[in-house]
Amino acid sequence: MPKRQRHQQLSRLLEENPFLTDRELTRQLKVSIQTIRLDRLELAIPELRERLKLMAERSYDSVRSLPLHEVIGDILDLQLDKSGISLFEISDEHVFSRSGIARGHHVFAQANSLAVAVINDEIALTASADIRFIRPARLGEKCIAKAYVRASGEQKGKAKVEVFTYVGEEMVFQGNFIIYRSAGESKT
């Protein structure tokens, strides 16, 4: 594939999914990792960590319902009472030592804290959660949780939030949360 065409495809892939690693790009574009890194340099596209930091800095509202340090994972995008995205990397302290499989409460905590963080209220607490683990998350995997506020204020004082967690394109967790709001009405 000609360099110009590869650059266009690389830009398009990262525009569609900014969470792609250099390794994943090598598989999709069928080139070496050195080629991907050189192409990114030429196109002034930062590495994954820097792309995530930039996304986080420019594209989210302020969390109102809990201190930012209490959110499990890094908030990448937040639109209060609408949607949110967080990233949580599974490391040694999150897994069972024998299997390298993440303890479920860490995956749940990411989804739950994002469901609370997306609520535009001073106080937001989980009332109930209907959850499903689709497959285990493993050491080194990056869990991307996406939260969507489906109903806010239909039931007085409650909001419905749906959260899907992915590793790459594969869903690993799904949860439907009912979140108590202190104000009892929608803030939108």
Image (cartoon, rainbow, N blue to C red):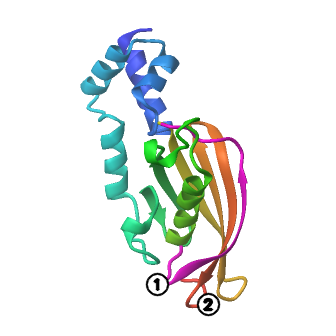
Badge 1 density bin: few <14, some 14–19, many ≥20, Cα 10 Å: few
Name the one closer to the observer, 157 or 138. Answer: 138
Q: Which mark is residue 184?
A: 2
Residue, disc 1: 122
Residue occupying image coordinates x 68% and y 41%:
135
The amino acid sitting under disc 2 is: Gly
The reply to whether residue 70 is in sight is yes
Q: Which residues are magenta?
A: 119-139
**Residue farthest to the front?**
98
Name the one closer to the observer, 187 or 37. Answer: 37
The amino acid sitting under disc 1 is: Glu
Element type at mark 2: loop
Residue occupying image coordinates x 43% and y 77%:
64
Whichever of labels 2 and 1 marks the residue nearer the N terminus, that label is 1
Q: Any magenta on residue 179? A: no
Q: Which quadrant is the N terminus positioned in?
A: top left
Marks 2 & 1, CB-CB < 8 Å contact? no
